[in-house]
Amino acid sequence: MKGFGWLGLLLLTLSPDIVLAASSPDFWLAERGEQKLWLLGSIHVGHEEMYPLPPAIMQRWQQADNLIVETDLNQSAPTSQQSLLSYAMLPTDTTLSQQLSLPLYQKTIQTAALYQLSEPLLSKFRPWFVAITLQQQAIQQAGYQAALGVDQYFIGLAKDKQVSIHYLETPDQQLAYLAGLGGVENDFLEATLKQINKVNADLPDLIKAWEKGDRNKIQALLEDDDTSPKLRQYLEQHLIKERNQNWLPKIMSETYPHNFMVVGAMHLYGPNGLIQMLKQNGYKISNIQTR
C-alpha cells in the first residue's frame, strides 16, 4: 500500500547521491507443523544498489515453492484503470479547491508546480490521490522507483523461476482503504506535503533503518510528528491491524510447505503485527541473522 507519507513505503509500498551499505534487513522464519514461512519486510520503492540482497535471504528464497505478496501491482487492464478512477475522482460538481482550506489548497498547488503538475490536472481528484501523486513524483525525482521495490524484485524472480505467487488482497481492496480515509483525508494530504519538503533527509533514514533491520526505528516511524492523531489511529486500526487480520487465515491455509512472504515492513511489528499474530496461532518464530 502506497500512502500515509513515507510510512507507505513500509506498509503497503533515497537520494541517488548516497551510497547504500550492504543490506542486512530483518528476516524471520515462522514454523508450524510441516509449514515453513520466511518473512521479509518490504520497502515498496528501491534503487539498484539495494541488490543483491544478503546470501542468507537468497538461500532461503531458493528453497521456496510459493511467494506471498500483498497484491498484483502490475494490473493495467481497463477495468483496473476504471476502478482506480472511480475511487480517485471527485463528484462531477466538486473540485479540489472546494475540498480543502485555502492555505492547504495553495500549498498543494505550489508543491505540484515543482513537479510540473498543473492546477487543472489535479482539480478533479480527491485529496488522497493528489497526495500519492505528489509523493510518487518526489520519490522518482530523488532517484528511486517502485519497479525496484523489494516486493517487485521477488515477483520478478518468482516469474523467472516459475514459482507460485499468491496475493493477499486485490488492488481494489487496497484502493478502498485509501478511499475510506474520509475525515482524515485532508490530514493525509497535509502530512504528505510536509514530508515531501524533507525527502532528501527522511528517505535515506528510512531506507537505512530497513537495511539495518532496525525494527525499533521502523516502529518509531508510527509516531511521526507530521501525522495527526486521527490519521495515526486510522493507520494503526485499518492499514495494519485490520489488513493483518484479514491476511492471517490466508497465510495459515497455504498448502505449500515452503513459503516466502514479502509484505510492507510495518506489517510485521507490534502487538497487531504478523509476527505476534503468527506466534499466537502456534507458530515457532525465529529471527534469521543476515549479516
Image (cartoon, rainbow, N blue to C red):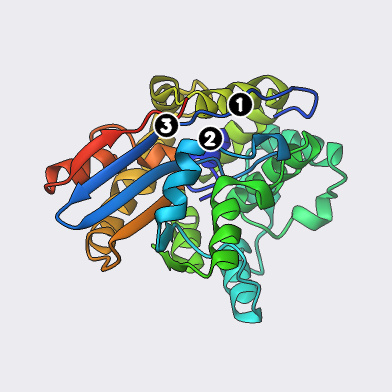
> For the residue carrying disc 2, how many other residues have a C-alpha within 10 Å: few (<14), some (14-19), or many (20+)?
some
* Residue for badge 2: 54
> For the residue carrying disc 1, how many other residues have a C-alpha within 10 Å: few (<14), some (14-19), or many (20+)?
some
Please say if the residues under marks 2 and 1 sit with CB atoms less than 8 Å apart: yes
Q: Earlier in the sequence, mark 3 or mark 2?
A: 3
* Residue for badge 3: 26
* Residue for badge 1: 22
- Marks 2/1: CA–CA distance: 8 Å
Residue lying at the far right of the rendered structure = 116
> For the residue carrying disc 3, how many other residues have a C-alpha within 10 Å: few (<14), some (14-19), or many (20+)?
many
What kind of residue is marked 2?
Pro
Give the residue drawn at x 41%, y 37%.
266
- Marks 1/3: CA–CA distance: 13 Å
Q: Of 30 and 105, which appears nearest the observer?
A: 30
Q: Of 148 and 73, which appears nearest the observer?
A: 148
Give the residue drawn at x 82%, y 50%.
119
What kind of residue is marked 3?
Asp
Residue 231 x/y as whole percent: 43, 37
What kind of residue is marked 1?
Ala
Please say if the residues under marks 3 and 2 sit with CB atoms less than 8 Å apart: no
Q: Is residue 210 above or below residue 37?
A: above
Q: Is residue 99 above or below residue 216?
A: below
Q: Is residue 287 above or below residue 75?
A: above
Q: Earlier in the sequence, mark 2 or mark 1?
A: 1
Mark 2 element type: loop
Residue 50 x/y as whole percent: 65, 35
Marks 3, 2: nearer the viewer: 2
Residue 255 x/y as whole percent: 26, 68
Give the residue drawn at x 45%, y 57%.
69
User: From the viewer's perspective, is 45 left or right of 48?
Assistant: left
